Amino acid sequence: MLRGVQDDDLPVMRRWRNHPRVRASSFTTHEITEDEHARWWTAVRADARRHVLIYDHEGTAAGVVAYSGLSPMSASWGFYLDLDGLERSGTLLRAWIGLERAAIEHAFGPLGLTTLRGEVLAGNSPVRALHRRFGFVEVGTYQRDVDGVPRDVVAIQLRKEHT
């Protein structure tokens, strides 16, 4: 289930985002400071083309889904999970699948999109495989600087009619 972000979610969202494995698979790998996180959240709330939600898994906050570039037809998305908490409970894979399902349903349901796009570091095979499982198609590759290092990136896309 996806829900709106509450102010008391912000510290845990930053903790999840700063997990070393989440940072390693992100386009920004440095540790996010409290001030940087607060500036980001202020910008998100002021931008109608961005939408950030909390994913609740089995009644517990477990991840973040972020949509950006929202238009009447399409948006890009990304996500991250509470890796430590979900691994401790033995529910990481179920939560990961649940988050992806909820994000797609929200995109093509309440957001009314026809196309959902994303980007994945080429070496992130588990995420690429999960996206393919849900019908995403890899539509291109390019190089992007990630903290000053060129990295291969795979562009993905899912169209509503293919869900």
Image (tube, grey):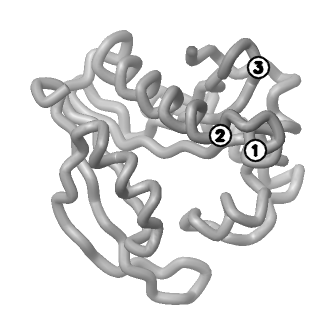
Residue 14 visible in the snapshot: no
Check contact, mark 1 vs mark 2: CB within 8 A: yes
Q: Amino acid at mark 2?
A: Leu
Q: Secondary structure at mark 1?
A: helix
Name the residue beneath numbered marker 2: 92
Q: Nearer the viewer, mark 1 or mark 3?
A: 1
In the rendering, at what x and y percent does residue 114 appear?
18, 26
Residue 118 visible in the snapshot: yes
Give the Cα separation between the discs numbered 1 and 2. Answer: 5 Å
Quarter of the image with the N terminus is top right
* Residue 137 left/right relative to 55: left
Residue 5: numbered disc = none
- In the picture as drawn, the residue positioned furthest to the bottom comes out as 149
Name the residue beneath numbered marker 3: 60
Name which residue lies at 36% across and 54% down: 129
- In the picture as drawn, the residue positioned furthest to the left comes out as 161
Name the residue beneath numbered marker 1: 87
* Rendered image quadrant of residue 52: top right
* Residue 9 left/right relative to 80: right
**Which one is nearer the viewer's eye here, 1 or 51?**
1
